[in-house]
């Protein structure tokens, strides 16, 4: 399912042939899904968002990025819905006013840092609107800075920064180590945290209420739209959590086979207009028949 438009499938999860739900909101993951590998919005993606609104379907984005790291998307997409950053750890209005946030207890944050370091991963800490690292030259820092549009603060220790932490990230190019750390963190902390990979080399650890499945529930409540009328699209294991909570889900073809299996549909890759193709083929045909703006 890695090819062009012909790779798109509308196979149903669990073999079900039930009529698709009427969609009133689409929630899109950003990196690996909405934007290209070069972190760009294509003209077709922008047009697709406008087509959604013309059909009476609201549009929202969610990401492991900090809210500040999504500001460059607000104007071209004319976003008006709340923006869940940190995988739902912080919800902000398009003007960056904080609506709600979920922070880790300091004692839990300290133990999470220790667990990540024990697996040989580099640690990043997000607190409020700030991003903290211990080494500016460590893996993926430069790339992340370019992606989110602001630099981290370099500190010698995280010791005095572990209260009010929204997200902790474990980073490594040893992908097996990241997977092992994910499993160990989930086992050790249970329901005290949400731990899932947002990229093969990133392990995101947040408050248990801060995950993309909870984002669907929060947006459903805030916008008064049943979760069954919400569609989601993504590419990573943490997106599977929102697939499970939404009425319709789409994986892009650059997602792993495991992620694709958990989606209702599979579209083309984010290099091949996967987002725009998904909107045209799977979302717009299921627009709310009542029409009008949501």
Image (spheres, rainbow, N blue to C red):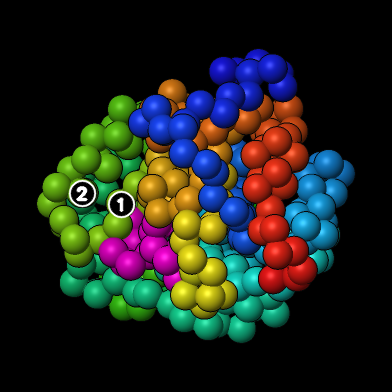
The picture quadrant where one finds residue 208 is bottom left
Given residues 186 and 221, the one toward you in this image is 221
The picture quadrant where one finds residue 192 is bottom left
- Residue visible at 79% across and 48% down in the picture: 48
Assess whether residue 51 is covered by the magenta stretch.
Answer: no
**Label 2 SS:** helix
**Label 1 SS:** strand
Which range of residues does the magenta coloring cover? Answer: 205-218
Q: In this view, does 71 lie above or below 106?
A: above
- Say which quadrant the N terminus sits in: top right
Residue 17 spot, x, y in % from top left: 46, 32
- Residue 111 is marked as none
Q: Earlier in the sequence, mark 1 or mark 2?
A: 2
Q: Can residue 187 be seen in this view?
A: yes
- Residue visible at 43% across and 23% down in the picture: 257
Given residues 68 and 283, the one toward you in this image is 283
- Left or right, residue 36 beside residue 209: right
- The residue to which callout 2 is attached is 186
Residue 102 spot, x, y in % from top left: 37, 75
- Say which quadrant the C terminus sits in: bottom right
- The residue to which callout 1 is attached is 195
Residues at discs 1 and 2 in contact (Cβ within 8 Å): yes
């Amino acid at each position: 399912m890695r090819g062009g438009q012909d790779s798109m499938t509308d196979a149903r999860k669990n073999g079900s042939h039930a009529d698709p739900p009427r969609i009133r909101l689409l929630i899109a993951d950003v990196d690996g899904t909405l934007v290209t590998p070069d972190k760009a919005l294509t003209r077709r993606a922008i047009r697709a968002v406008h087509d959604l609104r013309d059909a009476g379907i609201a549009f929202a984005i969610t990401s492991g990025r900090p809210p500040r790291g999504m500001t460059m998307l607000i104007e071209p997409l004319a976003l008006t819905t709340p923006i869940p950053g940190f995988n739902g750890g912080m919800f902000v209005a398009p003007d960056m006013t904080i609506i709600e946030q979920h922070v880790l207890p300091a004692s839990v944050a300290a133990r999470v840092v220790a667990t990540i370091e024990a697996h040989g991963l580099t640690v990043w800490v997000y607190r409020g609107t700030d991003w903290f690292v211990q080494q500016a030259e460590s893996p993926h820092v430069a790339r992340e800075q370019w992606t989110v549009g602001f630099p981290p603060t370099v500190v010698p220790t995280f010791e005095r920064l572990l209260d009010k932490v929204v997200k902790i990230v474990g980073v490594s190019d040893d992908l097996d180590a990241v997977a092992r750390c994910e499993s160990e963190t989930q086992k050790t902390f249970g329901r005290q945290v949400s731990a899932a990979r947002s990229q093969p080399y990133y392990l995101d650890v947040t408050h248990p209420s801060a995950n993309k499945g909870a984002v669907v529930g929060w947006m459903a409540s805030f916008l008064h739209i049943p979760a069954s009328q919400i569609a989601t699209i993504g590419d990573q294991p943490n997106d599977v959590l929102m697939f499970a909570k939404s009425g319709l889900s789409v994986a892009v073809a650059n997602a792993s086979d495991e992620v694709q299996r958990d989606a209702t549909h599979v579209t083309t890759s984010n290099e091949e207009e996967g987002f725009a193709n998904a909107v045209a083929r799977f979302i717009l045909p299921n627009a709310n028949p009542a029409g009008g703006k949501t």
